[in-house]
Amino acid sequence: MRTLFVGDLHLSADRPDITQAFLTFLDTQLHDTDALYILGDLFEVWVGDDIAEPFANQLADAIKQASQKLPIYFIHGNRDFLIGHAFAKRSGMTLLPEVYTLDLYGVPSVILHGDSLCTLDKPYQRFRRFRNMSWAKWLYAHLPKSKRLDIAAKLRTKSKSSNQQKSYTIMDVEPDAVLELLDATKTEQMIHGHTHRPAIHQLANGKRRIVVGDWYEQGSMLSISQDKIELIELPFGK
């Protein structure tokens, strides 16, 4: 048996190839699996459960069907932090806190999306703190749908422009932040996404950091069992 992790799919109506790849993944890759964890950015953008696009509802039905076979857990990403209990219930997913600890076949582990670890990106961290405030979420949720869609479009444009000007170091996790979280959670292994730099890092303190891959050019999953850790590419169309 194994546990699977995916993240950074960035599903959207204008990338049907990624949507189909994820549907194929749900149909073919969940055998002999204890649980599936989705580590955020399942969607390119999410402006509210009440504005779910038709393709998102199709995905919800597929995830719900898969959840009849195994538990499926979801941690919010920076693009879909507004996914709420309504969509999670429809999808059969269990929402987890943004930092979650678990025992993975005897290894104390911590999982998260990963954006909170990019502490050198000061402007983004300020925005992140603001968007996580309960009053800010309440205010946004009560705006007209057209206004929410407009804000989301502007944030996407600003994010793409800003990221093009940031260095590799600023866009990656900060090593001290990684070690601090491992120490704070008393864990030996960290699993996250967000940076789109899949790798298995052996840290100097003997602990491990694993980054799941994104789904822009191919699918990607992390498989962990009692005796093996694998980052597996899933070519589109197969």
Image: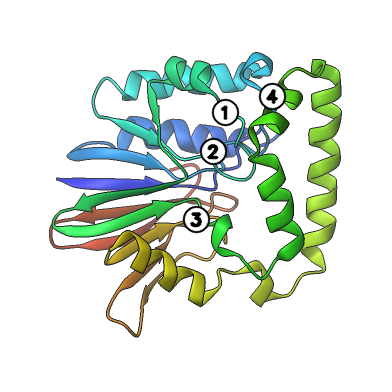
- Which of the two residues, 148 or 219, is positioned nearer the viewer here? 148
Mark sitting earlier along the chain (3/2): 2
> Quick one: SS at disc 4?
helix
Neighbor class of circle 2 (other Cα within 10 Å; few <14, some 14-19, many 20+) is many
Question: Relative to 151, is 109 above or below?
Answer: below
Mark sitting earlier along the chain (3/4): 4
Of tags 1 and 2, the one toward the viewer is 1
Question: Relative to 142, is 17 above or below?
Answer: below
**Quarter the N terminus occupies:** top left
Amino acid at circle 3: Gly
Residue 173: percent from left, percent from top: 55, 68
> Quick one: SS at disc 2?
loop
Mark 4, residue position: 138
Mark sitting earlier along the chain (4/2): 2
Q: Residue at x 25, y 46 (%)?
A: 3
Taking the image as drawn, is residue 85 in sight? Answer: yes
> Quick one: SS at disc 1?
loop
**Quarter the C terminus occupies:** top left
Residue 193: mark in rendering: 3
Amino acid at circle 1: Ile
Of tags 1 and 3, the one toward the viewer is 1
Residue 83: mark in rendering: 1
Residue 42: mark in rendering: 2
- Which of the two residues, 107 or 70, is positioned nearer the viewer here? 107
Residue 168: percent from left, percent from top: 67, 75
Mark sitting earlier along the chain (1/2): 2
The quarter of the displayed image where residue 91 is located: top left
Q: Residue at x 52, y 19 (%)?
A: 87
